[in-house]
Image (cartoon, rainbow, N blue to C red):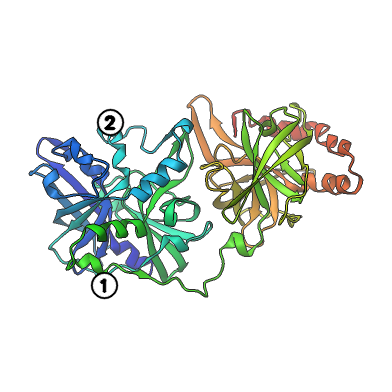
Amino acid sequence: MDITEVEKRCCVVSVSDRGKTPVSCSGVIVHPRAGVVLCPGLPFSRFLSERRSLSTNRKCLSPHSFTKRLQIRLSLGTQKERSKSKACDAQLVMLVHCPEFKLAFQSAFLQTDQWSFHGDNEDEELVRNAQFLSWFAVLKTNNPTDLDSGVIKWLKSSTLEKGDPVIACGSPFGSLCVDLFINTISRGIISNLAGEDNAVILTDARCLPGTEGGGLFRLKSPDCLHFIGLIVSPFGWKAHEWIGLSLVCSVQVIVRNILSCAGAQSPLRELQPAERDLNISRTAHQSAGFPTVCFVDSGSLWGSGVAVSPQLVLTCRHVVHEKSAVTLKFHHRQRVLTVPGDVLFSTNVTSPYDVAVVQTREPVPEVSAPSMAESFCPGESVFVVGYGGLGQTCGPSLTGGILSKAINLNHKPVMLQTTCAVQAGASGGAVVRRHTGELLGIVSSNTRDLTAKVTYPHLNFSVPVTVLQRLLHHFTATRDTDVWKDLNTTEEEVKRVWRLQDSQSKL
């Protein structure tokens, strides 16, 4: 399946009932010959005839659970003109529940972290029905589609890795201006995975309201994509801050639960997974040997840290929060190693560089010194590795982007900016060169407009590793913590650069 076919596989779903405001979202055509479409169950929540139908032990809901006046229209892209769409009627086959997704969602997105997955102006009734996030609709249309191919090729989410490149396809704003927005493509990576068979997928591919129900496709090459999930929510907020990641449910668990409810002769039985190519290259963060990033907990605050040796971690001053000791957690192959650490040094609050140095009391196994960059090239592809987003729940998250700017004074870099999505908890994380794994910098903050009360995760600031490299070498040779005090005696011009970011959001 190539990009062109991905676009033709997606559609817009509009659900209405006389006397009620129509609701729209995106959908994916999984079986063209049988006319079978998958989309989220949330738009159907307001059309339930009985609320008790949502009993937790229900595996699926039949059309009889909804109003008899339910009307469903599909808008399909056409082969002849991409700017044109055609519409047809569809019927609801069933709504199916995915308990694996619900359990993983509840475990990863804790209520104490004030998570929400809806737009600020989202329909209030749909927000109240957020329990429908783990329900998915199976639709059927009798109108033939323009697709000549067979059942969609999908990939088991249990084979996915953080950093896998992906394509998201959905229709921003749903049924609004369909011919203009239908089946828009966005590119990103898998940022994190959670739950049984990776039921929950987080991606940094940019999605907008209305793309709920759009498809997420694993990208091996431009002409080889596989369906891996259905977009559940294009927006996510944590403590009222936009995190810049989209929530996706694995198609593997959706299909598993559909088949447990479908009849023996159902065409849905033809939905079988493709085999992942065993010769596929390892994902970038594995093959490039990225730095080891750990979770840093100072008690009242937490963030990330970069291990620069088996016993030394660099993080941010505001993460250690004036503590003399912190707890470090290293996630490695489904195991978590918890070790105590002593704060050897922390910059003064007057220093433009928000840096702290932590030493573990025992060497951490399987940690080696990372390769450090000596130069920076604006426009190059980078990853940010840190504990933003899901925190310590599922290990560090990855977000991709470019190095948008390297600010120099006297021909020396003093600040890096990237377009990667950086969230609360990513402070102290690593900015790395995507193709080599070299460490470029230590994440300091993203940007917050205090007047508008808006956070911009894709505009963020990092301390260049070249600022720290000479001090690190000197400390390694002498074990003299006073060498780090140079960070407190920076030139006034450097302070002026960082003071311009007074509205930064400390993570």
Q: Is residue 309 in view from this perspective?
A: yes
Residue 154 placement (x, y as % from top left): 36, 66
Q: Residue 150 — which label?
A: 1
Q: Is residue 264 above or below residue 257?
A: below
Q: How many marks?
A: 2
Mark 1 Cα shell of 10 Å, populated few (<14), some (14-19), many (≥20) = few
Q: Is residue 2 left or right of residue 292?
A: left
Q: What residue type is disc 2 on? A: Glu
Q: Which residue, given by chain and number where applicable, does mark 2 sit on?
A: 124
Distance (Cα) linking label 2 and label 1 = 39 Å
- Residue furthest to the front: 57
- The x, y position of residue 115, in whole percent, is 43, 35
Seen from the viewer's position, the closer of residues 296 and 440 is: 296
Q: Residue at x 74, y 26 (%)?
A: 349
Label 2 vs 1, first from the N-terminus:
2
**What residue is shown at x 54% (from left), y 31% (from top)?**
448
Q: Identity of the amino acid at label 1?
A: Gly
Quarter of the figure with residue 442: top right
Q: Quadrant of the C terminus?
A: top right
When the figure is inspected, residue 352 is found, relative to residue 409, above or below; the finding is above
Pick the residue in front: 426 or 457. Answer: 426
> From what the image shows, is residue 226 above or below residue 194?
below
- The reply, left or right, for residue 496 in relation to residue 271 is right
| Quadrant including the N terminus | bottom left
**Closer to us: 463 or 65:** 65
Q: Residue at x 22, y 57 (%)?
A: 261
x, y percent for residue 454: 48, 31
